[in-house]
Image (tube, coloured by chain):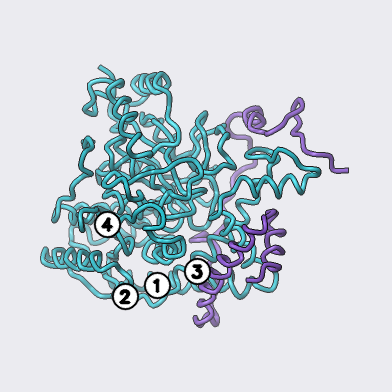
Chain colours: A cyan, B purple
Amino acid sequence: MSDAALFGWSSTAEYCTYLDENDKKVGAFLSRTGADEFQSALERSRSEASDRSPLRGMPFAVKDNIAVKGLPLSCGSKMLETLSSPYSATAVEKLQQAGAVVVGKTNLDEFGMGSSCDNSALGTTHNPWDVARVAGGSSGGSAAAVAAGMVPFALGSDTGGSIRQPAAFCGTYGLKPSYGVVSRFGLVAYASSLETIGIISLDAQLLRTVFDIMRGQDPKDQSSRPFSPQASEKRQGEKPRIGVITDIEGLAPAMESAYRERLDLIRKKGYEIVEIELPMLEYVVPAYYTIASAEASANLARYAGIRYGHRTDWADEHSELTEKSRDEGFGDEVKLRILLGTYVLRSGFKDQYYLRAQKIRTLLRNEILSAFQKVDQILSPVFPTAAFPHGDAGLDQFQQKLADKFTATANLAAIPALAFPAGQSEGLPFGLQLLGPEFSEHKLIDTASEFTELWEPKTAPGFREWR
Amino acid sequence: METRELYETASLARLSLGEDEAAVLAEEVGRLLEYVSRMQEVDIEGLEPTTHALSEEPILRNDEVHGENLSDSLLDNAPELEDRFIVIPNVL
């Protein structure tokens, strides 16, 4: 009996066939571990991982901006289409040591920039609930792979909502941990002060297990921090006091009524709901795009067509080589953000944009910290709409950016946030989000698990359920 | 944003842009800049900037080699090699 059988498959061949067949519909993966390679990794896991490890022999998928040794690391970009990663991310290594096995790398918006996966230069990902619609982004491939029962969990990265928004679109859980709690070593840099590696799963308890294995301070990431949940572990056993944001303007009407309905259910169940005001919420998106683009313009300067990545066919001298390689290698959205980021850092403009955004970040953080004096957790929508259709029928890039306000708040404030399935609205899944003080990940998972019992979310129809 | 200003920014970002591309991007960057400019409404008097989330002090480690030597597999990803040197066009 192979290890895959432990998770309900009769053989690894049966499992691999399921992946092949269903990924034709969904397009979650950009690359897959070969069948032989997968088999030997499973056997290695069986002999090396502890019998008691809950992840022994468990397959998982990894967003293609997180390094796995020997596999591609394309970031969904033509720039890195041929890159093979020489090393693995610390988070991946820890999971492998616990016996989990990588089955492949998942699609994303190029370098994590987008909310649909339609900004990927290398593949199209469809929502398992309705293949005419996007899976969300930027970790859309990971969310789609989980929702389609192809893997029990997948890794994503979250800079402004890139785990939670696709989780909401696909009806899964999506955890963005506190900043620094999971090592970023091996995560391709986009906006260093905001981004984290996190997890997508349909199973809240598995999410907790994976988080507990992945986290920890890492000497290879000097911004990583030890997990110190003492402060947030108070009030054990009591129902958490839930703050709700009064300003939820801009939600699609169906989402707003679904949100209010869920809120009523939660209130009826005996949770104390306290309305809170976050005046800075209105400035989250401007501050977020200023900071993220500025950091992106610096981080993406490394793609010069010289040491690795795309190089243009012909250039007379090295600066032309760099300029042409970057023009050919980057897609439209990446260029837009590099240009915006370069502009806001230009001399004469820096105080007006970048420094101001960082001070607004301070204000937002102060508001959030004072909210957590009154409430234990904050409940909010994830995104103003359900999964939108591909192409022109959906939201344009600018509208997608405006819709980041609920998610990007947690990145600016460096606090953990958990998206969880809240049921369906008009046949599509929608999500809610819990925000908590730093290191409150476990408590967020507890609360979300209690909430989801109130409406028992379904899984995407037509796919095998991974249990 | 004027196209001239966009080209200046693109040159700082080491991006060569075609004319059509530049016209579209000038409009889009301009639209985003106008949008983020609403930050001017906020009173930020006396506030310290949050430059890096929650970093109280730099975390240092000893200057020691960790892990394996990756130089060969890193070089394998270079677009053009001569022995162990990465080739670029003549600088002269």
Label 1 secondary element:
helix
Percent across and percent down for residue B62 are: 62, 42
Separation of residues labelled 4 and 1 (CA atoms): 19 Å
Circle 3/circle 1 CB separation < 8 Å: no
Q: Residues within 10 Å of mark 1 (few under 14, many from 20)?
A: some
Label 3 secondary element:
helix
Q: Which residue is mark 4?
A: A431
Q: Which residue is mark 3?
A: A287
Q: Are marks 4 and 2 on the same chain?
A: yes
- Residue at image coords 33%, 50%: A133
Q: Amino acid at mark 4?
A: Gly
* Marked residue nearer the N-terminal end (1 or 2): 2
The correct choice, above or below, for A297 with respect to A99 in the image is below
Q: Nearer the viewer, residue A166 or B1?
A: B1
* Marked residue nearer the N-terminal end (4 or 2): 2
Q: Which residue is mark 1?
A: A281
Q: Residues within 10 Å of mark 4 (few under 14, many from 20)?
A: many
Left or right side of A402 for A330: right
The correct choice, above or below, for A50 with respect to A319 in the image is above
- Residue at image coords 40%, 72%: A281
